[in-house]
Structures are given as C-alpha cells and as structure tokens.
Image (cartoon, rainbow, N blue to C red):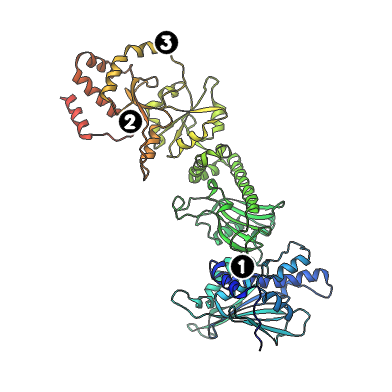
Amino acid sequence: MTVKPFQAEARRLLDLMINSIYTHKEIFLRELISNASDAIDKIYYKALTDETVSFNKDDYYIRIIPDRRQRTLTIRDTGIGMTKEELGTDLGVIARSGSLAFKQAHESRDGYDLIGQFGVGFYSAFMVADVVTVISRALNSGQAYKWEARGAEGYTIEPCEKEKAGTEIILKLKENTEDERYDEFLEEYRLRELIKKYSDFIRYPIIMKISKTRKKAGSDNEYETYEEDEVINSMVPIWKKNKNELTAADYENFYAEKRYGFDKPLTHLHISAEGTVSYKAILYIPERIPFDYYTREYEKGLELYANGVLVMNKCADLLPDCFSFVKGLVDSEDLSLNISREMLQHDRQLKVIAKNIKNKIKSELENMLRTDREKYETFFRQFGRQLKYGIYSDFGREREFLQDLLLFYSSTEKKLVTLAEYVTRMPAEQKYIYYAAGPSVERIEKLPQTELVADRGFEILYFTEDIDEFAIRMLGAYKEKEFRSVAGGDLGLPESEDRQEEEKSHAALFKEMAEILEGKVNEVRASRRLKNHPVCLASEGELTIEMEKVLSAMPNRPDLKAERILEVNTNHPVFAALGQAFANDTEKFRLYTELLYNQALLIEGLSVEDPLALSEKICRIMV
C-alpha cells in the first residue's frame, strides 16, 4: 500500500504540533471531541438547506471507547463523515481546516457555530498515540475509507467497511515511560474527569460505558459487575438557559459543582451580552474569603469557554485585581484563539469583555449596597480590604471607580458608613473628613487625639486595617472634602489668640524638652487637641505613625520614619508639676520629660525603647 507523505513541511510541522503547541497532553481528548461535535453540526447545517437531509438531535452522539487489552482509545461520532478526498485534504494537509471551509460556505444560524477552525486539533492525537486510525463514511455515500498514520512519516488511505455515516478515530496509545503514563487515558475515572473539565457543555451526548456493581439475582450478599451506557457531559450549560428558567438553587448547585468554593455564593450575575463581542457569563461573589486569598498561591481568573469548550481554566485578564475574588466563567463565540486553542491570538475581544464585566460587578455591588445593606456589609467584611488595595495600587488609577464602595466605622453612628453618608452629615462649618487610625475600634475610641474633634461634634471615621491610610492618601479627597487625621499636625480648626499667646509663653520649656528627646521626636509643643489626657504623639507630613508601623512590619523593613511630635496638655495638672520642675529641678524635669514621652509611646501602641529604664524611673518617683 502506498504511503502518501504529509504536505506543508509535515515532518517539521507535525513535530512542532506534538511537542510545542500544546501545554498538556490531555488536551487531545478535548480536540477530538470538538471535532466530533463539528461533524454532527455539519449535518445540522445541511438539514437547514437540503430537504433530503433530516436532523433529529436524538440520533446524534459521541461515544468514547477505552480498550485496555488492545491499548486503544476510540472516539466515535455519528456526524457527517468524510469522503476519500476529504480524508486526503483535511487530514493529509496539516493546518487545513475542513470546519473552517465549511463554516465559510454556510451561514451560521440558530446560534450554532463550529468549534474547529484551524485543522490542527486532530494532530494532538499524536502526543499520546503511536498510530492514529480514522475510519469514516460520508453522509449519503455507500463506501467507507480508512486513513492511518504513524507519526510524521506519512499516511495511507484504503477502502473499508462501516455500516453508517460518521467517523471513528482509533488511537493506539504509546507505551508508558518514566516521565509519562499513557495508561491513564484508558481509565474510566480519568476520561470522565477530562470530559467534565473540557467538554462538559458540548451540545451532543458524550457516551461511555461505565462499570457498575449490583447484587446478584436471588442473593443478599453477592455482587456482580456490569457495564452500562452513561452520558458523561451536561450538554446544555446553565449560562445558555433563560434566567427565568433558573432558580437560586440552580445557581448555588452550579457553584458547588464547579467547586468555586465550599461556601455558598453571596450573590450571582447572569450576563448575556450582544454587541461588538457577544458573550455569556455567570459570575459569583463568594460569601467567605478563600483561605489562600492573600497568598502567592491564589490565582485569580474566570474560566474561559469558546463556544462551550473550555480553553482556559484561569483567565486572569478577565478580572481586575480589585475584583479578583469573583468566581465564574465566560463563554464567547467571538474570541480569536491561536491554533492550539490554549491561548488568545490577540486580546481586543478580551478587553471588551473584561471592561464590561468590571462594570457589571461594580453595578451589582452598588445595587447590593442600596437594597441589602446587611448582605453588603457581610461582603465588605470579607473583601473590603481588596477594594482598598484596588484604590492604592496602580497609583490610584481606580480610586474614583471604587470610592463609593468603601465602608468605615463611624464614631457617631457606631456602624459602618459610606463616604457619601459621612459627607451628607457634615455640619456646614466642618471643612474636612476626619479619621483616626488604630488596631481596633476599641483602641481608637480611647485615643486621646480624638478628643478635640469629637468635642466639636464632628464625626470620625475609624481606620482599623493596615491598608486604610495608604488608600486614603491615594484618594486624597472625596467630593472636594480633604481627609485629615486626628493625629495630624494640622486639624484645620481655628485657634484663639489666647491659645497662641499661651504657647509662646511656654516656648523655652518645650525647647528644653525637645533637646532632652533629641532624635526621638522632631518637636515638642502645646497640644490643641487634648482635653483630659496629659500627653500624646502627633505627626507631620505624608507619613503617619500608623503608616510607619505598617511599613516597619514588612519583610524588607523600609527605613521610613514619621515626623513625631510630642504634644503636652498645658491644662492638665501634670503640666503644673512639669513647669515647677523646669523652674527648680533640672534632673526631675528630665525625668518627667522622659516619662511623658514613654507614656505617649504606650498610648500610641508603640514599644518602649528601654522597659528596664522606664521601670527604674517610675520607682524613683515612687520613693
């Protein structure tokens, strides 16, 4: 029998197909099933224009047949089949796609579209098989033909027997090696797993005989094994169904089936978009944060399908980082894929889809915030930190997009509030949005720095997460209202002339304290913010003390320090004792100064530089 050589520099190109184009060998099954689906679709297309061709969907299927004894895997379809000429042209010329030619010759109707376009998916079979045999009989033809190839050497075509139209591809699997185990593609559980992963939504039944166990007739304790045909794939994906056909339970079940999480979804979005790029999507916002969410191991991304066939398990480009917690999938017939269908050929369509999804997610969150505040707060407690990171990252590019989704605890409302709600309640005389930062609401409520602002009746937002101040610094202002820290150097509040004169009168005392604390604080001054506490730390500049704490806890520990200011309450009884010591006892004045500084450190939650020295100073005062 004459062996015909492959065309198009076949030896080199086929070697490239087998060794370079596909990342995972398991992809071969996806490709062959997709081709089988196309073969059935072609009959459907013909039935639309040819009255002699009937199409009853129940008559069409794809069968997977593993044979351990022969080490063969067969993929059989009841599709349109191929003539001798088509076997030579479509399989003999690498990268010539019969599906693409058919698609170009027939108008797409009723939402059906052919999956195969490049004509190379078939050759992925050579990644796992030494010999590939194709037996095919074309529709309305009385003769079947067998095409067979062993690697890139060439192929043969000869007549054969086949009862009905359709194609079967028989793979003689390679022998196992130290690195590769080809037997896995004969195992029932592995084939089921691959079909569910890649081809679950092929629109024709994928059938395989499944081994099952039952009690023997007339026996209570004896069992027998038998085989039974089972449809492995779901066929009709949930995202292609009408929303009014589906219940909340349907969406929750799909979430569990896809193993998006062990929780229940907080909410879902079912998108069906038509336009420049048409696509369907189902997106979920989880109820709980994944355990590995803030680790390097976590991968964001949505499953990406092309016409019902999985082409990418985690398409990161479909989600912005700020919404990386979203789970789900996107299915589009308009994607331009490369020849392996594992990567996108270019990303124009993807960018259109990603932009639309981004806006849809935001709209859903805004709607939840308006209509179900309790549910939104549940979401925010889990994923609010990620929204704040979204504002801080990329130099604040997304700050306006995300700012209305933020929540912070309010000193007056005693609950989480939005920035819009805060600004709406601001008195006419209040110029700034005030905030206080600390490790918890309880700690912040005890901070002495909040006294003056709270006494004026101004609401204070509590920042309890390490990202909060960094995000707000990137935000800068909200509705033209600048953010001010209650521990900042300038609170933006008017001062009386008496206060200014009092400060001048104590200038020498504060100068002496600053000299004693040289290298520890940048300045000592009379406090404008304290009422009941004797002392506190404030800061000047862009870097606050809380931000310094966050930076110092990082692995690289950047050497950045806030400009610390020690503020002393001149109306507190302690200040009178400090003044007497300044006038009469230099040693006691130094002792009081160091004690006040250490007291300010403890109030701020900072470590005392020398606990033993502090203990000795306290003992000196006691005796």
Task: Quote the CA–CA distance across marks 3 and 2.
Answer: 30 Å
Q: Secondary structure at mark 3?
A: helix
Q: Which residue is mark 2?
A: 603
Q: Residue furthest front?
A: 9
- Furthest-left residue in this view: 623
| Neighbourhood count class around disc 2 (C-alpha, 10 Å): few under 14, some 14–19, many 20 upward | some
Q: Which mark is residue 497?
A: 3
Q: Mark 1 belongs to which amino acid?
A: Ser
Position of 562 with respect to 282 (left or right) is: left
Q: Report crowding for label 3: few under 14, some 14 to 19, many 20 or more residues within 10 A (C-alpha).
A: few
How far separated are the C-alphas under marks 2 and 1?
61 Å
- Classify the position of the C terminus by image quarter: top left
Contact between marks 3 and 1 (CB within 8 A): the answer is: no
Q: Is residue 36 above or below residue 424?
A: below
Q: Quadrant of the N terminus?
A: bottom right
What residue did someone put label 1 on?
199
